[in-house]
Structure formats: C-alpha cells, structure tokens
Amino acid sequence: MYKDYKFSNQIKVLSISLILIGLLGILYGFYKAPSTVEESKEIVASMSHDSDHGGYGYGDSDHEGYGYGDSDHGHESSGHEYDHDKHVFNQLHNKPWAAIYVPALFFMMISLGVLAFYAIQRASQAGWSIVLYRIMEGITGYLFLGCVFVLIILGFSALKFNHLFIWMDPEVVAHDEIIRNKIGYLNIPFFFIRAIVYVAGWVIYREITRRLSLQQDEKNDISVHKKLFKFSAGFLVFFLVSESMMSWDWIMSIDPHWFSTLFGWYVFAGMFVSGITTIALITIYLKSKNYLEFVNNSHIHDLAKFMFGVSIFWAYLWFSQFMLIWYSNIPEEVTYFITRIEDYNFLFFGMVVLNLIFPLIVLMNSDFKKTNFIVILTGIVIIIGHYIDVYNMIMPSAVGDMWSFGPAEIGEFMFFLGVFLYVVFRAISKAPILAKGDPFIEESKTFQYYNLD
Amino acid sequence: MSSKSLHVLFDDDDILLDAVKQIVKSKIHINEIYTPFPVHGLDKAMKLKPTNISIATFIYGCLGFTVSVMMMNYIMIVDWPQNIGGKPSFSYIENMPAFVPIMFEMTVFFAAHLMVITFYLKSKLWPFKNAENPHPSTTDDKFLIDMETGTNVAKTKTMLKKLGAISIYVINNDEDEK
C-alpha cells in the first residue's frame, strides 16, 4: 500500500535556507547597482582596470558593440549626441532587475510548461501518465505565485523603477519611430490587461482541474473525467495563443525593434522541456523516498523520451530562428544575434551543448532512459541549460555587454528555487499522492513499455 | 530420416503469445512465426536476440553526416566558391549554418535508406521475390507458427490444441524438396 507524501522537514529547511541566502544575494545585487550616472562611471572605470576579471565581455568591444545592443537612446536621435554614460547607467541600473526577472520568469515557465503537459495528458486521455498527475498538479501549484512575482516585476518596470522595457518610457517612444508605430499594441494599460488575461486563464484552468481531479478521487463518476477532458482541450487552444503572446509581451518586447515570428514556439519548447524535466526530477526524488511505488521504470523511460525529443525540438526551433536571421542578414533582425554572439559567446553556444548535444548523446540509448541516475544527471544539465537560455533572452537586451554572473545572479536563482521547492512540495503534500479515481488508473499502474524488461 | 515440422494456426495474437511462451518452455524449437501484423513482445517470448539495427543505423547516420560535410565543402568552397547572402568568406566554418539543413537531411537520408536496405538483406527480401509464407491467411487474420515436432508428435499436438491452436498441419520437409 502506498503512503501519501508528508511535507518533509528536509525540504522545508532546504527551501527556507535557499530563500534566505537568495534574499542576501538580491540585496547585494541592488546594493551594487548605481543610483546615479557618476556612480555608474566609477563602476565602469573600475571594471576596465582589472580586465583579468575572467570571462566578462566588456572592455574590448566597447564601441563597436553599441550600434546594436539595445537601441535605447542611440541611433535614431540624429543631431543629439550619443549619451554613452547615460546608456551605461541605464544598463547597470537595469542589471539587478533583469537578473531577478530571469529566474522569476524561468520558474514561472517551468510551472506553465508542466500545466501544458498536464493539459495534453488530459486532452489525449493518456493512459501511462496518471500516476504522475499529482506531481504535475503540485508543480503547477507554483503557477499563481510565479505569475504574481513576474507581474510585480513588470509593475515596477511600468512605475519606472527600472528601464527594462524601454517602450514604457514616453521620452524614448517620442524619439523612436519604430516603437511609435507599435504603440497600439505596446502601451502600458493594454500590456497589463493582456497579462492579467493570460494569468487568469492559466490559473483558473489549474484550479478547476485540480478541484475536479480531487473530486474524482471520491466518486467513481465518468462525468468528471469528461469534464476534465473538455476543459483541457479548450485550455490548450487558449494556452497556445496566450503563451505565444506572453512571450512577445514579456520577453520579446524588451527588444522592441526586433521580432521573430517563431519566438512563441521557441519559448514554448524551452518551457516544455524544462517542465517535463522537473516532473522527472521530482518523481525520481519522491520515488527514492519510497513514496511512489506505483511508478516503474517504464514511466521514467517515457519521461526521458519526452526530455530527449523536446530537447531536439527546442534545438530545431533555436536553429531555425538563428539560421534565417543569420542568412538574410537584415540589420534590424541580426542585431539580436550579434549582441549574443559578440558579448555572450560562451553562454550562447554553451547552452546549445547543454540543451541539445548532451541530452542527445546521453539519452539516445534506451537503457540510459530508464536509469534514474542518468535521468537526474541529464535533467540537471537541461535545467541549467534552459536557465541560461532564459538568461540569454533577457540579459543581452536589458544590460548589453554589462553582464556578469556573480553572487546576485546566483542568489536570485536560489531565492526562486527555494520558493518553488517550498510551494511545490507543499502542494504535493496537500493531496493524495495517487489520482485513484481516474478511469485509466489501472492501465497507468501496470504500464509496461514492451521493450523494457 | 525424414524431417518433419508443424504448421500451427492461431486466430488471436494474445493466445499466440501465451502459446509461444509454453512452446519455448517445453523446449521445442520454433523456426519462424508468420503474423499479419507485428505482435509486441513476440521477439521476447521467442527469446530472439535483440536486434543491432539501431547501432547500424547510428553508424549510417554518422556516415551520412560525414559525406554531407565533405560534399558541401567540395561543392560550395573548393570547386566553385560562391558568394551567398553577402558572405563571400569562402570558408566552410563561417558558412556552416547554411549547410546544417543539408547535413541533417543527408544524415536522415543515409540512416533511413541504409537501414531499410540492411533490413531487407538480413531478412532475405528483394523486389519480385516470391512470398514465403506457408499459409495465405497469415496475410489476412491468422497467425502461424512454423515449429519442430518435438519427440512425440501426438503429444505436441494435444498440447497445442490445449493452447488454443485452431488447426495443425504436419509438413514433411523431404517431400517438399523433390
């Protein structure tokens, strides 16, 4: 007989200490950020003094980098002198905000990716994954809080605490014809109306299915199953549109001149694979604590197949986006990749190794996919890789070549990891660990991939 | 000594699978099984060796990848250098992204075609070959086990009947050869 998960002290202590250490990192990041242009000049000066700071991109590429980077104030203001110091100040001022935005977005998207995966399982009435439903529901328990974090940061942007979204600054828009033409879509009220619609849609679907799923445990009634199916199928339509628009709004509009038509898909592939990986990691963790005895290696094998497949799918979209822009070489499109290749070279290509080459080689073998240790190892690599992917989407547009990876970035990652773990494991402990009322539950418990022993 | 074999017909894949397990357990050799569709788990039940075709396919894919790299280098860089997309660098590595779709396609092309050809060779199949299946209904809805008789034909027959065989034919292989 299986036992339900109890929120263990181990996780509690771990997550709370992660949150506390993370808070220190966040404070450090904001403390280091300059509050005036003079301070930022000093910081830049001290940076170029010790140029053996290892791995940082600045110093050498100062001036050639600026035509692209972010086009904040620069090239459209003909006649005005280019205000380099102000520009650098804005970048440094943005840095802690951008650094906190990256993990906030990353963990919110893990939760959202799992929600999409869950809806797909429900809508396809999958048989194999029912034993994992409660873990997925636990991970999507973070969605509401994660969205709130992101919305708070966006709210601070709108209130001019930072300069992440330059189109929110009327002064910039006045001098920028490209942004002015987009003002019907990119304006603060409409931006937040959209954001609330997305978040409401996702959270309401999550709450409805969670309630129905718990209700199904109690009564053996096929109508609940049918309702879950209908809600999930409807949600997937809403999700694919809202996710795409979310990626334009929350990520692509940091670079308001640049656009890519497959960006929504690209972001989706990233969140989908990190979500599935998180399911696998938490499943294996709970199984090692003797909780999920009905999960066998065929379930793990299936999750690993998804990790393998979606990693390739992500790489396909990454490359499709890159190659078309690289090939056509249109200035306003290609700036996006020039910043990333010149200033973020190691991260930009390193992430492809972590997100494609490593899972491709390791998870190709069928025996490896059912081995917990290898799935955990690959899972951690994929999670790190996709964190870097999100970092690469936000940072180059927000801070240009002024990036670094220090205690602030690590602290912010730890903070959100701590909150994520706390909320997720608490949500898992709140419900029975097996969705025992599902009509296909026996199929899921006895699931056996014919090719595995 | 005349060598005999049995052709045993079944009409259900689950019954067939259970029967195969019993036959293997009673140590009677199965020569071949003819089924109208692939039956999952049959290879395991027959204790066949796992196939190595996936490893062969991986190697074919690597071969295709290498051929594509060399081919594009020869065509686009060495033999007739071309200025494409305003990138007249004539260097393979700098133009590499443009060649990735070709590398991908050639990898898939080599892996897929050579895998199928290998499979045909291993299964002794070629175009216009006459069908080997001993009973035409194995292409329709019946399953046939071609097996040895065991030491006692009558005993084997009763066992097979019990396992759910719908008909059993005793085949005299010596006569076939004449």
Image: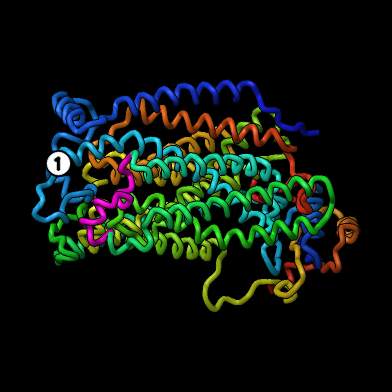
| Residue, far bottom | B128
State the residue in front, A314 or B120.
A314
State the residue in front, B72 or A33.
A33
Q: Residues within 10 Å of mark 1 (few under 14, many from 20)?
A: few
Q: Is residue A97 magenta?
A: no
Scheme of colours in the image: rainbow
Q: Residue sitting at 28 percent across and 52 percent down?
A: A170
| Residue A23 falls in image quadrant | top left
Is residue A41 visible to the viewer in this orientation of the structure?
yes
From the image, tell me which residue sits under label 1: A84
Q: Amino acid at mark 1?
A: His
- Image coordinates of residue A408 in percent, x first then y, are 36, 28
Magenta stretch: dominant secondary structure: helix
| Marked residue chain, label 1 | A
Q: Is residue B166 above or below residue A58?
A: below
- Image coordinates of residue A347 in percent, x first then y, are 31, 40
What residue span does the magenta drawing correspond to? A162-179
Is residue B99 visible to the viewer in this orientation of the structure?
no
Q: Residue sitting at 68 percent across and 67 percent down?
A: B37
State the residue in front, B94 or A226.
A226
Q: Quadrant of the N terminus of chain A?
A: top right
| Residue A342 falls in image quadrant | top left
- Left or right: where B145 falls relative to A135: right
Q: Is residue A178 magenta?
A: yes
Q: Quadrant of the C terminus of chain A?
A: top right
Q: Residue sitting at 21 percent across and 52 percent down?
A: B93
- Image coordinates of residue A298 in percent, x first then y, are 65, 44
Q: Secondary structure at mark 1?
A: helix
Q: Residue sitting at 34 percent across and 28 percent down?
A: A30
- Image coordinates of residue A419 in percent, x first then y, are 53, 31
